[in-house]
Image: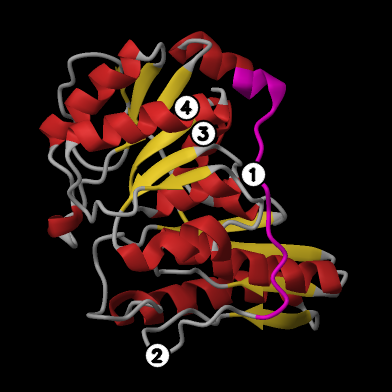
Amino acid sequence: MPKKILCISPFSGELGWEIVNYIPYVNGIRRAHKFDLIFACVRSGRERLYSFANRFMLTNLEDDVKVSGNFGPMNKYRNRIQVSFENRVGKMRGRGWECTVSRNMTKHDRGMFPGRKFICYKASKEEMDLCHTQYGEKYAVILVRTRRNGRGKNWPIANFDRLGTAVESFGFTPVYVGSGSKHKFSCGINLLGGTTVSDVIPILCGASFAVGGSTGTMHLSSMCKTPHIVWGNKRLIKRYRKDWNPHRTKVCFLPDSGWHPSVGYVVSELSKFLKLWEI
């Protein structure tokens, strides 16, 4: 029976905060103390983000359901999760359950947790070879935001289609990644609605670059050390260039674009940075 167990409760906020704040905080705890077992309750499809855990309990919190303005646990699910989680751990623990991590971000607590140890997500050679077999030796990930929350931040699908055509003209196979329903594109490979966060990690690792509006998956690009071109609110510039970029991944944040840059502007800047980065 394990004597010292680290129990990680589920993070139900935004993916970016989970990747850059919560997981590094938990990773810092597990590196500072020796645990016999690390038990993580996570959203289904995100297990790979917690690669240091030994056992998992999966939950299915919907990304689009939130308590208004709250980045912490969703009240609608909290009781069910905690009862299920604690009962499962209770069967294992004996006298040994010594540490529970349950802190999440709220709108009133947006500072970074202390003692974070960042993870650089990687893919195996076999995974990289498979990606290059499926998508080509040179491919680019186009991150398509189609969320129901904050629809004003969604770029039109027609714009992504035109962007994909431009990416192909630069010599890269466009691979469309994102949640939501399938959409038809003029070229490339359409993975919309067909991948989990864990699936996307090797796809990003094998890509020449990623491009799209600011999303949690774009922050994952940074943690995979995949060069990326991104647009969004100006207040995010420092986050992408420094604060949320611990591995100093190559990034181009389009400074004057907002959430709806023109396709021509994105393509023009993309062309400049591909030459600058020698991709």
Q: Are marks 2 and 3 in contact (CB under 8 Å)?
A: no
User: Disc 3 residue type?
Assistant: Leu
Most common secondary structure along the magenta stretch? loop
Question: Could you tell me how far apart the alpha carbons at marks 2 and 1 are, in whole angstroms?
Answer: 29 Å
Q: Earlier in the sequence, mark 1 or mark 3?
A: 1
* Eye-nearest disc, 4 or 3: 4
Residue 117 point in image, percent of width and height: 72, 65
Q: Nearer the viewer, residue 83 or 246?
A: 246
Disc number placed over residue 22 in the picture, else none: none
> How dense is the environment of label 3, judged by Cα within 10 Å: few (below 14), some, or many (20 and up)?
many
Quarter of the picture holding the C terminus: top right
Label 1: which secondary element: loop
Question: Could you tell me how far apart the alpha carbons at marks 1 and 4 are, in whole angstroms?
Answer: 23 Å
User: Disc 1 residue type?
Assistant: Tyr
User: Disc 4 residue type?
Assistant: Leu
Which residue is located at x 35 percent, y 35 percent?
A: 269
Q: Are marks 2 and 1 in contact (CB under 8 Å)?
A: no
Q: Which residue is mark 3?
A: 204
Question: Could you tell me how far apart the alpha carbons at marks 1 and 3 are, in whole angstroms?
Answer: 10 Å
Residue range of the region highlighted in magenta in the rendering: 114-128
Residue 123 point in image, percent of width and height: 65, 32
Which residue is located at x 48 percent, y 52 percent?
A: 219
Q: Are marks 1 and 4 in contact (CB under 8 Å)?
A: no
Question: Could you tell me how far apart the alpha carbons at marks 4 and 3 are, in whole angstroms?
Answer: 17 Å
Q: Is-magenta flag for residue 134? A: no
Q: Which residue is mark 4?
A: 274
Disc number placed over residue 108 in the picture, else none: 2
Question: Could you tell me how far apart the alpha carbons at marks 4 and 2 are, in whole angstroms?
Answer: 39 Å
Q: Earlier in the sequence, mark 2 or mark 3?
A: 2
Q: Which residue is mark 1?
A: 121
Q: Is residue 75 above or below residue 137?
A: below
